[in-house]
Image (cartoon, helix red, strand yellow):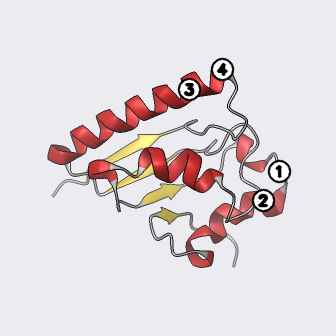
Amino acid sequence: NELRFFTVGDWGIGSDLTVFERSERVAMEAVASEMSSYAQDFDPAFTLALGDNFYEDGVIDEFDPLWEDAWRSIWLTGALKSRPWYAILGNHDWHQGEQAAKSQVKRESATDDDEWKMPSAEV
């Protein structure tokens, strides 16, 4: 048996799309498109997101528009649609504070979004 999955890190963009960030979005869309093409044959079980999920300053909460604008609309398309993402926090994900960072943990239970998985270390 083989376990196949993708990994991405430092993949996020922010809501203030400067010229630099627009070029970053184009680059992200190109990477996501290639991943989707490859996934047709590779059939990854999930994507492992290695942090810095939302630049520059993370998300505000589990309903922040960045969830759609910087994640779902780019990374959950084509053959990547409906595949789970297991994520960890990076330093940029903490810029809005502890509660904002923890909203990434709450995302799955607070919304009907069942692709985003961020297990909590809290008991």
In the image, residue 52 sits, relative to residue 100, either above or below, namely above
At label 4, counting other C-alpha atoms closer than 10 Å, the crowd grade (few under 14, some 14-19, many 20 or more) is few
**How many numbered markers are drawn?**
4
Q: Are marks 1 and 2 in contact (CB under 8 Å)?
A: yes
Amino acid type at circle 3 is Glu
Task: Please state if 72 lies on the left or on the right of 4 as rendered.
Answer: right
Q: Residue at x 73, y 35 (%)?
A: 16
The quadrant of the rendering that contains the C terminus is bottom right
Foreground residue among 91 and 1: 91
Amino acid type at circle 1 is Gln
Amino acid type at circle 2 is Ala
Disc 1 and disc 3: Cα gap in Å? Answer: 21 Å
Task: Please state if 15 lies on the left or on the right of 30 as rendered.
Answer: right
- Mark closer to the chain start, 2 or 3: 3
Q: Residue at x 74, y 57 (%)?
A: 101
- Mark closer to the chain start, 3 or 4: 4
- Mark closer to the chain start, 4 or 2: 4
Which element carries disc 1, helix, strand or loop? loop
- Mark closer to the chain start, 1 or 3: 3
Disc 4 and disc 2: Cα gap in Å? Answer: 26 Å
Which element carries disc 2, helix, strand or loop? helix
Disc 1 and disc 4: Cα gap in Å? Answer: 23 Å
Which element carries disc 3, helix, strand or loop? helix
The quadrant of the rendering that contains the N terminus is bottom left
Q: Nearer the viewer, mark 3 or mark 4?
A: 4
Q: Which residue is mark 1?
A: 96
At label 1, counting other C-alpha atoms closer than 10 Å, the crowd grade (few under 14, some 14-19, many 20 or more) is some
Q: Which residue is mark 2?
A: 100
Q: Nearer the viewer, mark 1 or mark 4?
A: 4
Q: Which residue is mark 4?
A: 19
In the image, residue 100 sits, relative to residue 111, either above or below, namely above
